[in-house]
Image: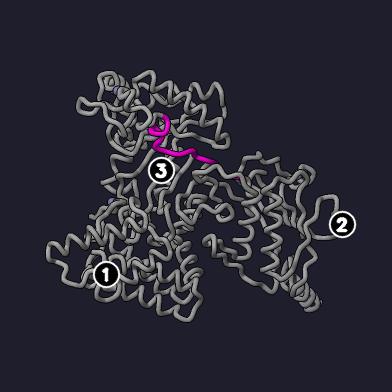
Amino acid sequence: MKKLTLLLLLALLSINCAWAGHKLFSAGKSRYSIVVCDAASESELTAARELQLYLKQISSVYLPIKSSDELRRGEPHIFIGYNPSYGKKLGVETPAVESEAFTYRSVGKNIWIYGGKQRGTMYGVYTFLEREFGVRWYTKDCTKIPELESWQFSKLNHSEAPAVLIRQMDYFDAQDAAFLAHNKVNSVWNSMQNDYGGLVGYWRCHTFEHFVNSNKYFSSHPEYFSLRNGVRQPHTQLCLSNPDVLELCKSGMLQVIEQNPNYWVYSLSQNDNFNYCQCEKCTEIANKYGGQSGLLLWFVNQVADVVKEHYPDKHISTFAYQYTRGVPKDIKPRENVVIRLCSIECCFGHPLSECDHNKPFMADIIKWKDVAGKLFIWDYVTNFRHYLVPFPNFNVLAPNIRTFIDHNVVGIFEEGQYQSSGGSFADLRTWVLNKLLWNPSQDTRALVEDFITGYYGAAAPHVLEFFDLCHAQLKDDMVLNIFYQIDSPILSDEFISRGTELVNKACQAVENQSDEIKHRAALVQLQMKYIHLMRHPAKALEDGTYDYFIDFIRRHKIRITEWEDVEGWIRWYNDIYLGKKIRQGTLVAKAPSGV
Ligand SMILES: [Zn+2]
Ligand SMILES: [Zn+2]
């Protein structure tokens, strides 16, 4: 009898083990349909359509999309979006429309994906595809979609919420609406209305010149502009204590908002130079409020007050940048003023909170945290003088984002190579940053390996080794700043020799792969070609690097520096860089034509 009970128990256990869960699809078949909630938002409809398309590519099955009144009892469903009728059943409250948090979970054989209507549910659908099926949106042109024979689940229950409210990217290839939505980035410069719930728009920066233009006003009103060493000068900053300047900015700002109503925030901020006004009155106000940031805030607050009267839900932003980075005294930003604190002077080789070089910035952010109700970070993630040199900052991305969040920021903006494709690891850095802005607790190394393995085909092992070699160059006593020079010790001779070997191997490994993968490997290699071109111009002319490089950047429109377009840089290289060496007699190779 005992034996029989044991056998029965074993039989029951084996039945239980054989149950592999609810089959969403198997062998090209599925019983499921996708159900969009009543009054679904545009982004929820987009997400439902895309779920259908991606599942089709994963499983070869086309799941029908139905509305809630088309449901048939007994059929299994994936419910997209929150609906009060089943909200009760699930025991969850209605999410706020603007909430970007989401949950996906199963109850029996049904799956529910819901969040805020604007973008939350949509983010839930994309995360469901990523986490459960391995879909990756690496770049706007490279999506990994695994093909699966079957997929089943026993219990799903997963929730996420963004670590920071506004996540803004400034890489050239990160401006595509679908790519941004898939990776949960919700802001760009432009206020984009789209099928993905729109994007938080940030209207411009360095806008003093926009509101009081030097060409228009300087000849008739030189007093509107900075007094520098006793002389009024155009193309500097504004004389902020001048009441006419204030009126021009007030009326100009109201006009901008009226003409561009879809932005969250509008910038009223210093031009990109250090030439603030030294007149007596400006100096007096600056002294009263603890420095140039105090004068700026005194001015911006007055414009913000007028904006609030007409547009109570809009924000005005200004900089805490360079000469205005310090925290003012006895004055605070108005509730509708966003302070955009810029980390431009920092070392990005070591985390902000751990590097001596970054102590002044940390001192400022700690004070701004208490003064600014809405603090927004402008962060820098590449070398702007030489877009193509390695910028080994991947180890600081997550800790720095966490540092910003610890100081109550409402948003983080990551400025990279925004003018063209092709900077040092631009694709990889864009994707990893997208992920970390949403959740900086993620494992950066795992993200890097995921991308490199999925993106570089057979070149992946060599690319990863090169990536690690770049990071190994950074020593504790080095400062990684965003304008580091080509003769920096970061680019040692040993690094150049080994790095060149690795990128060449990467290109050789993909010789028989697709043109896309060859191009990705060539972009990795381009970093070493650029260093060779700059360090050894004579050799680069002789060994063909010069011809290859110029042809490559022309064909693919790759900018080399923030300040020059492609042709401008080529002219600079030929006329100034090579020209000087030829005149000095240090370049003996045959110069290219036109030099
Ligand atoms: Zn002045
Ligand atoms: Zn450092």
Residue denoted by label 3: 378
Q: Viewer-nearest of labels 1 and 2? A: 1
- In front: 437, or 246? 246
The reply to whether the magenta stretch includes residue 110 is no
Residue name at image x 42 percent, y 33 percent:
210
Q: Mark 3 belongs to which amino acid? A: Trp
Task: Please indicate, yes or no, whether residue 329 appears anywhere in the rendered image.
Answer: no
Q: Mark 1 belongs to which amino acid? A: Ile
Residue 116 is drawn in which quadrant? top right
Per the image, label 1 sits on a secondary structure element best described as: helix
Instruction: From the top left corner, tell me how far across and down residue 406 is, in percent.
Output: 43, 41
Q: Viewer-nearest of labels 3 and 2? A: 3
- In front: 591, or 132? 591
Other-residue count near label 3 (Cα within 10 Å), few / some / many at <14 / 14–19 / ≥20 = many
Per the image, label 2 sits on a secondary structure element best described as: loop
Depicted 238 relative to depicted 354: above or below: above
Residue name at image x 26 percent, y 64 percent:
594
Task: Please indicate, yes or no, whether residue 440 appears anywhere in the rendered image.
Answer: yes
Instruction: Kindly report the distance in space between the C-alpha atoms of the residues bearing marks 1 and 2.
Output: 66 Å
Instruction: From the top left corner, tell me how far across and down residue 379 is, in percent.
Output: 39, 46
Q: Earlier in the sequence, mark 1 or mark 2?
A: 2
Residue 460 is drawn in which quadrant? bottom left
Magenta segment: 198-211
Depicted 560 relative to depicted 90: above or below: below
Instruction: From the top left corner, tell me how far across and down residue 273 is, in percent.
Output: 30, 37
Instruction: From the top left corner, tell me how far across and down residue 438 is, in percent.
Output: 52, 50
Residue denoted by label 2: 72
Compared across the picture, whether 435 is left or right of 124 comes to left
Q: Which mark is residue 496?
A: 1
Instruction: Kindly report the distance in space between the C-alpha atoms of the residues bearing marks 1 and 3.
Output: 32 Å
Quadrant in which the N terminus appears: bottom right
Q: Earlier in the sequence, mark 3 or mark 2?
A: 2
